Image (tube, rainbow, N blue to C red):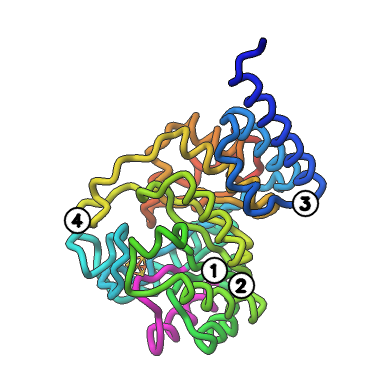
């Protein structure tokens, strides 16, 4: 008689094969099926996700770069964030990046072959004069470099989003951050629905949407699946995945690090839940070995926020180009 584990394993593999065939045919998993991925054997789960990535993701690596246009002094209390004024973290505080520094960052990234460039600002929302200044920067970047422009300026209203759109910004970034059931334990100054409203404004104005979040913030594996499902509400064109690097001074400073295996399984679940949406490495990947980063890219990651001297991603554009090439991508 066969061992019961073997029977269960075989049944799971059959179920996964059924899911995989459906996804490769253009279908998608329902909610219960996404949760059932948590019971699948890891190797098979990751291989299934890798097949979906190979089928649906272009061979061109989806690179982008960011500049912190405004840093620190944020009114919000997100427990993971160095920039919240509720915590003492020693992060840089400045209200506006100098214009020349922003243009230089855009120029360097453009020359390095990076495809998209984003202005990112701390705070609940950028409004008024600060928004007008940032819109001017984005319009100038577009005119001088032709870069695809993105912005991440908080919980904008419709009119503010329109200002960005008028400045030529093509994509708006607003992370849902984590599962809804976990978010309420990490931030009480704004809500998931606030984020979804801003994201909807971007959709209504014909902008693309970038929305993902952070894993390793003490969430359970089930909450990672819940998060992947919740992101469907944002209808994102790009999903950035950050890995928490706990920051001293924040309430999450003592959070145990998520293991490489958990990261691989999470990438697989995200890929199988979002078969045709680019998944990009964002912050926190520098703690992974090169091999672990390549494994993430085999499973599902096909883009990244890449670094240069003006950002703190922890890698250079040249290093990331070599990494993407080793993973089989053109950069
Ligand atoms: S709103 Fe943004 S900048 Fe402010 S604390 Fe939250 S994550 Fe940090």
- Which quadrant: the N terminus? top right
Q: Quadrant of ligand 1?
A: bottom left
| Residue drawn at x 28%, y 65% as measured from the top left | 83
Which residue is disc 1 drawn over?
150
For marks 4 and 1, the one nearer the N-term is: 1
Q: Secondary structure at mark 4?
A: loop
Q: Are marks 1 and 2 in contact (CB under 8 Å)?
A: yes
Q: Which mark is residue 170?
A: 2
Q: Where residue 81 sits: x, y (%)?
A: 31, 60
In the rendered image of this protein, does residue 181 appear above or below residue 162?
A: above
Q: Which residues are magenta?
A: 119-141
Find residue 84 and report its horizontal and vertical position in percent.
Answer: 27, 67
Of marks 4 and 3, which one's residue comes earlier in the chain? 3
Q: Is mark 2 within 8 Å of ligand 1?
A: no
Q: Nearer the viewer, residue 324 or 125?
A: 125
Q: How far is mark 1 from mark 3, CA to CA?
A: 30 Å
User: Residue 319 appears at what percent x and percent y?
Assistant: 48, 40
CA gap between label 4 and label 3 equals: 45 Å
Helix, strand or loop for disc 2? loop
Where does label 3 land, which residue?
27
Image point 22% across, 70% down: which residue?
85
Of marks 1 and 3, which one's residue comes earlier in the chain? Answer: 3
Q: Earlier in the sequence, mark 1 or mark 2?
A: 1
Q: Secondary structure at mark 3?
A: loop
- Please tell me whether mark 1 or mark 3 is closer to you in this view: 3
Q: Where 235 falls versus 27 (above or below)?
A: below
């Amino acid at each position: 008689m066969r061992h019961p584990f073997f029977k269960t394993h075989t049944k799971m593999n059959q179920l996964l094969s059924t899911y995989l065939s459906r996804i490769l045919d253009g279908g998608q998993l329902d909610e219960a099926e996404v949760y059932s991925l948590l019971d699948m054997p890891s190797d098979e789960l990751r291989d299934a996700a890798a097949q979906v990535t190979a089928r649906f993701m272009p061979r061109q690596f989806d690179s982008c770069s960011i500049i912190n246009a405004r840093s620190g002094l944020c009114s919000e209390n997100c427990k993971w964030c160095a920039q919240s004024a509720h915590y003492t973290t020693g992060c840089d505080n400045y209200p506006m990046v100098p214009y020349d520094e922003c243009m230089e960052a855009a120029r360097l990234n453009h020359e390095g072959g990076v495809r998209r460039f984003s202005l990112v600002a701390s705070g609940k929302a950028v409004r008024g004069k600060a928004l007008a200044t940032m819109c001017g920067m984005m319009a100038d970047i577009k005119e001088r470099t032709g870069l695809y422009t993105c912005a991440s300026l908080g919980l904008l209203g419709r009119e503010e989003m329109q200002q960005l759109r008028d400045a030529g910004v093509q994509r708006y970034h607003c992370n849902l951050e984590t599962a809804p059931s976990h978010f309420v334990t990490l931030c009480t100054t704004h809500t998931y629905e606030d984020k979804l409203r801003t994201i909807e404004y971007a959709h209504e104005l014909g902008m693309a949407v970038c929305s993902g979040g952070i894993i390793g913030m003490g969430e359970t594996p089930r909450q990672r699946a819940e998060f992947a499902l919740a992101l469907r509400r944002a209808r994102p064109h790009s999903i950035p995945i950050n890995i928490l690097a706990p920051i001293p001074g924040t309430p999450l400073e003592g959070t145990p690090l998520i293991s490489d295996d958990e990261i691989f399984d999470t990438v697989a679940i995200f890929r199988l839940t979002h078969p045709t949406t680019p998944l990009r490495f964002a912050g926190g990947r520098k703690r992974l070995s090169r091999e672990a980063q390549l494994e993430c890219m085999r499973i599902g990651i096909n883009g990244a926020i890449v670094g240069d001297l003006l950002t703190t991603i922890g890698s250079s554009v040249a290093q990331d180009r070599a990494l993407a090439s080793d993973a089989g991508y053109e950069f």
